[in-house]
Each structure stands twice: as C-alpha cells, then as structure tokens.
Image (tube, rainbow, N blue to C red):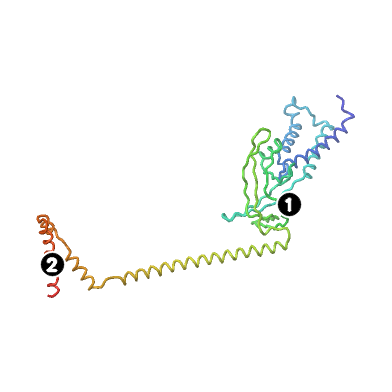
C-alpha cells in the first residue's frame, strides 16, 4: 500500500494521539514519580523493541525505524506523549502524620483526585493499585477533605550534606484500613485512608492563633490536672500512713496491764480441768460427778488464795 501522500497526515495524527495518551496516562495513574506507571513502561518497551527488532529478530520487525516517515511518526508520538504526560493533571500534597505513642512524625506525599461520583479518593503509589484502577476502575477512598485545609507549615530537614524542606498539612493521626468492594462481579480490595486534622490547621490565620491558644490552654489544664492527681495520691498515702500509726497506737493502748493479766491467769487456772479430773469424772456418776468438779474447783481457788496470801 502506497502511503506516500498520507505520511504528513499520519505524522500529525500520531503526534496528536501521543498528546492525548500522555495526558490520559498521567490522569489515570496519578503517579507522583513521573513515567513510573504501567502505560509509560509498556510504551517505552514497545519503542525499544521497534528499534531493536530489525537487528535481533527481523521476522517480527513490522515497523522500519530507518524509514524517515515511520521514524517521524514514532518520534512525534513520543515527544507529544512526554509533553502531554508532563502537563497532565496531578493533585498531591505532603501530609505530616503524628504518632504520639511512638514519638514519630511521618511525612509522605498523597496523590488525591475526585472520581466520577465526585468522591475524594487517593492513589497508592504501587504498580498493583495503578493496574487495578486502569483495568477495573477501582478507587481507594480518602476520608479527608484536603481542599478545605489551606494552611500548611514548612518542615525543614537538615542533613549532613543535604537540606530538604516541604510545606505539609499537619494531621494528628493517619490510618489506612483495607476494605472490599464488589465491581465487575469480582470482589476487590481497596485501601481507605483517614486523616484526623490537627487543631492548629485552620482556614484563617486568626483562627490559627485562636486555636493555638486553646491548644496551649488544653496542655496547661492537662498539666494542672496531672499535678493535682499527684498531690491527691500523695495525700492518700500520707493518710494511710497516719491511719496505720493511729491503729498501732490504739492497739498498744489496749494492752492489759500486769494486775489484769494476773487475774485472768488465776481464773484460767481455777477453771482448768486436767486429764486426771476427766478420768475421775468418768468413774463417778450422777451427783458424785458434779460434787467432784465442785470440790476440785474450790480446792484450786483455795490454793490460789493461799499462794496470794503467802
């Protein structure tokens, strides 16, 4: 087929096609690192195969890269693809998520977009999740309105040889939760990203100062409550110690004196029954048994009185 008169139109058509394909690839992949998406990698491999195929495997060389017209189509498509990709829409923001328990601050770029249902979504920077979006149009929801928070703070990291800085949206916490959605009769896994905005990030600078003072007041109140709690614990321990001392003093004051102890011993001794008394009681019956115990008791009381008199 003679394409001599059509080559100029084909070159222009391929150039325009590359512009649209580049913009579509950027919008669909939402990759922050450019040309790191499956579409760009596939086109790069295809172009390399076109230029290498005539020398390696001529039977599969359907395009002659040494033909100026065909080479112009390839170069025009590649250049406009790069231009369309660079001009494609990409919304991303650096988010600073604080981990209070681990004393850690995680700063990462988050690419976000609105899908066809006008829902805020984000794109995980992974080949698998990009393929899910390209092939099945799977969106990962994001529970955070990035557009409503315009105040950002600058974070500067100074290393030994390099210095990095970024304007970040300050958040109190970031959680990524896996969920499942049903689409195209299949069950797909998605990642829901949730941010808890920091109270210091506000719309207006006056609100920033106001909320900043409120946050400082919360911190001061927390410190005051903590001190009051410590004072209360110290007071309780002091009361326990004083109570223990008072209890020991009361027990010591209740100790019987020597005269009372002597009277108690006498009574115990007078009422004491020995094994011999029990044996005699077994042999005795009736009134003899009662009189025996009565006589024994009087005898012991008399012995106690005689010893006291002596």
Residue lying furthest bottom: 309
Instruction: Identify whether 15 is placed above or below 106.
Output: above
Q: In the image shown, does 274 or 31 lie closer to the viewer?
A: 274
In the rendered image, the quadrant that contains the C terminus is bottom left
CA gap, disc 1 and disc 2: 106 Å
Residue at 67% x, 59% y: name it: 200
Would residue 291 be found to the left or right of residue 49 on screen? left
Residue 298 numbered tag? 2
Residue at 62% x, 46% y: name it: 176
Circle 1 SS class: helix
The residue that disc 1 covers is: 147
In the rendered image, the quadrant that contains the N terminus is top right
Q: Are marks 1 and 2 in contact (CB under 8 Å)?
A: no
Instruction: Identify whether 183 is placed above or below 249.
Output: above
Would residue 118 be found to the left or right of residue 176 on screen? right
Residue lying furthest right: 5
Instruction: Identify whether 15 is placed above or below 238.
Output: above
Q: Quadrant of residue 75?
A: top right
Q: Quadrant of residue 152?
A: bottom right
Would residue 299 be found to the left or right of residue 9 on screen? left
Q: In the image shown, does 302 or 209 lie closer to the viewer?
A: 302
Residue at 63% x, 55% y: name it: 172
């Amino acid at each position: 087929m003679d394409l001599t008169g059509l080559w100029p139109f084909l070159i222009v058509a391929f150039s325009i096609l590359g512009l649209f394909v580049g913009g579509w690839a950027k919008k669909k992949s939402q990759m922050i690192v450019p040309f790191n998406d499956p579409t760009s990698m596939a086109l790069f491999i295809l172009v390399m195969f076109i230029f290498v195929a005539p020398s390696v495997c001529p039977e599969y060389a359907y395009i002659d890269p040494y033909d100026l017209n065909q080479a112009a189509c390839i170069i025009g498509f590649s250049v406009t693809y790069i231009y369309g990709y660079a001009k494609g829409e990409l919304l991303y923001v650096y988010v600073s998520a604080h981990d209070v328990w681990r004393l850690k601050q995680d700063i990462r770029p988050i690419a976000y977009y609105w899908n066809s249902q006008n829902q805020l979504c984000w794109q995980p920077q992974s080949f698998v999740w990009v393929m899910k979006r390209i092939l099945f149009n799977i969106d990962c929801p994001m529970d955070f309105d990035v557009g409503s928070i315009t105040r950002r703070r600058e974070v500067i990291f100074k290393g030994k040889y390099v210095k990095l800085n970024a304007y970040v949206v300050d958040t109190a916490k970031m959680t990524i939760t896996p969920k499942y959605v049903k689409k195209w009769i299949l069950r797909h896994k998605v990642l829901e990203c949730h941010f808890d905005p920091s109270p210091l990030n506000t719309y207006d600078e006056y609100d920033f100062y106001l909320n900043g003072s409120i946050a400082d007041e919360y911190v001061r109140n927390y410190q005051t409550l903590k001190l009051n709690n410590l004072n209360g614990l110290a007071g309780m321990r002091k009361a326990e110690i004083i109570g223990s001392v008072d209890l020991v003093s009361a027990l010591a004051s209740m100790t019987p004196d020597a005269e009372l102890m002597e009277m108690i011993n006498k009574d115990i001794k007078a009422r004491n029954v020995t094994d011999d008394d029990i044996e005699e009681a077994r042999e005795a019956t009736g009134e003899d048994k009662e009189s025996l115990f009565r006589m024994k008791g009087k005898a012991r009381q008399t012995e106690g009185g005689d010893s006291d008199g002596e």
